Image (spheres, grey):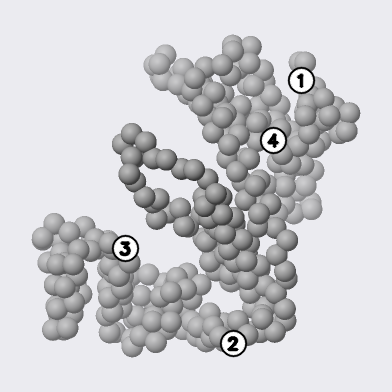
């Protein structure tokens, strides 16, 4: 049995989630009065109403649903929205929307929705890549396409310091087995993780793939990145090329998303350049943290990998 305190916490969390979900739906559609005029009602819940517009909005965010399951899915979504509406009504009646915790969550969600809307607008209107650009990208990245492989790897990741890295490199140069190096790292208190793994080309970062593709089987190599390092050994490979016809739509999606990401990144840089930003308190004198540069780069880098993986 849950204690009364835990029950209260669980109920509050559920109601906050319902309020946030309701805010997200309303933020992407019309106002309540406009919905009643412009959309068809699907259900009335006390004095509230669930519209077809709300159902469709939820379905648009769900994975593709087979046509034969569409009606059942719509009904399931409606039942979920009814439960949500009941929870929201109770929350409003109890004035939970005025409590500090709920107000903070609602404001944070509102800010996220608005910021995302601006970034999507900033990244819109990019030119479609030309056929020449698509074919050039295909030709310039054979490891992802024409020479694509499935790799069986042995990975050993560890926290890296200059001293640790130098020691590991020295032991590798002397031909010490990777397992012995792992044992020595653990004995010195260094956290070690990893093991055997099977990865396709698109599951390896675009920066590392060329080195992995050209590595000799059985020969360990060391890779470094921002305080982390890994010893990676290619145990075996299996060719699985991706022909141009299948690759071009994926490349088009990737290049389009990359352009959008660059536009968003430029927009944020311009906003920062025009803004007066002053760091206060504990952050006084701080410089912008590195992750600020990564706001919009991940979607573009990941788009092609996700698309290729979907063909498996």
Q: Tell me whether the residue at label 2 lies in contact with that at label 3, contact meaning CB atoms closer than 8 angstroms.
A: no
- In the picture provided, is 108 more to the left or to the right than 185? right
**Distance between the alpha carbons at the discs numbered 4 and 3:** 39 Å
Residue 140 vs residue 209: left or right? right
Give how far apart the Cα atoms at labels 1 and 3 are: 53 Å
Query: What number is the disc on residue 27?
Result: 4
Q: Nearer the viewer, mark 2 or mark 1?
A: 2
Q: Residues within 10 Å of mark 4 (few under 14, many from 20)?
A: some
**Is residue 195 in view?**
no
For image coordinates 39% across by 40% down, the residue present is: 279
Q: Which of the two marks, 1 or 3, is nearer to us in this view?
A: 3
Classify the position of the N terminus by image quarter: top left
User: Residues under labels 2 and 3: Cα distance?
Assistant: 31 Å
Query: Residue visible at 66% across and 45% down?
Result: 117
Residue density around tag 1, few if under 14, some if 14–19, many if 20 or more, within 10 Å: some
Res. 57 image quadrant: top right
> Which quadrant would residue 50 be assigned to in this image?
top right
Which residue position holds label 3?
A: 226
Residue at 34% across / 81% down in the picture? 235
Q: Position of residue 72 (x, y in %)?
A: 76, 42
Earlier-in-chain disc, 2 versus 1: 1
Q: Is residue 52 found left or right of 21 in the rendered image?
A: right
Which badge, 1 or 4, comes first in the chain's sequence? Answer: 4
> Is tag 4's residue or tag 3's residue first in the polypeptide sequence?
4
Q: Which residue is mark 1?
A: 48
The numbered mark, 2 or 4, whose residue comes first in the sequence reads: 4
Contact check, label 2 and label 4, Cβ < 8 Å? no
Q: Could you say whether the residue bearing mark 2 is in a helix, strand or loop?
A: helix
Q: Secondary structure at mark 4?
A: helix
Which secondary structure lies at badge 3?
A: loop
User: Mark 1 or mark 4: which is in front?
Assistant: 4
Q: Which residue is mark 2?
A: 139
């Amino acid at each position: 049995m849950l204690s009364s305190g835990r029950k209260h916490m669980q109920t509050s969390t559920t109601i906050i989630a319902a309020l946030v979900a309701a805010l997200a739906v309303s933020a992407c559609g019309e106002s309540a009065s406009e919905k009643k005029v412009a959309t068809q009602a699907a259900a009335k819940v006390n004095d509230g109403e669930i519209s077809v517009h709300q159902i469709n909005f939820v379905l648009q965010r769900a994975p593709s649903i087979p046509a034969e399951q569409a009606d059942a899915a719509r009904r399931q979504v409606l039942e979920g929205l009814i439960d949500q509406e009941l929870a929201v009504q109770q929350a409003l009646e109890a004035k939970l929307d005025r409590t500090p915790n709920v107000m903070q969550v609602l404001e944070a969600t509102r800010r996220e929705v608005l910021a995302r809307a601006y970034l999507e607008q900033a990244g819109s209107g990019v030119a479609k890549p030309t056929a020449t650009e698509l074919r050039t990208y295909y030709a310039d990245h054979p490891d992802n396409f024409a020479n694509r492989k499935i790799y069986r790897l042995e990975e050993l990741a560890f926290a890296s310091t200059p001293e640790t890295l130098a020691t590991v490199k020295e032991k590798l140069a002397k031909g010490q087995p990777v397992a012995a190096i792992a044992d020595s790292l653990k004995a010195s208190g260094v956290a070690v993780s990893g093991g055997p793994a099977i990865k396709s080309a698109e599951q390896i970062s675009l920066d590392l793939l060329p080195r992995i593709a050209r590595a000799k089987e059985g020969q360990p190599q060391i890779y470094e990145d921002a305080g982390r390092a890994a010893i990676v050994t290619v145990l075996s490979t299996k060719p699985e090329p991706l022909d141009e016809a299948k690759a071009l739509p994926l490349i088009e999606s990737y290049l389009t998303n990359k352009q959008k990401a660059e536009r968003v990144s430029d927009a944020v840089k311009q906003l920062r350049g025009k803004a007066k930003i002053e760091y206060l308190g504990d952050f006084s004198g701080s410089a912008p943290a590195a992750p600020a540069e990564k706001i919009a780069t991940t979607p573009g880098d990941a788009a092609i990998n996700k698309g290729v993986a979907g063909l498996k």
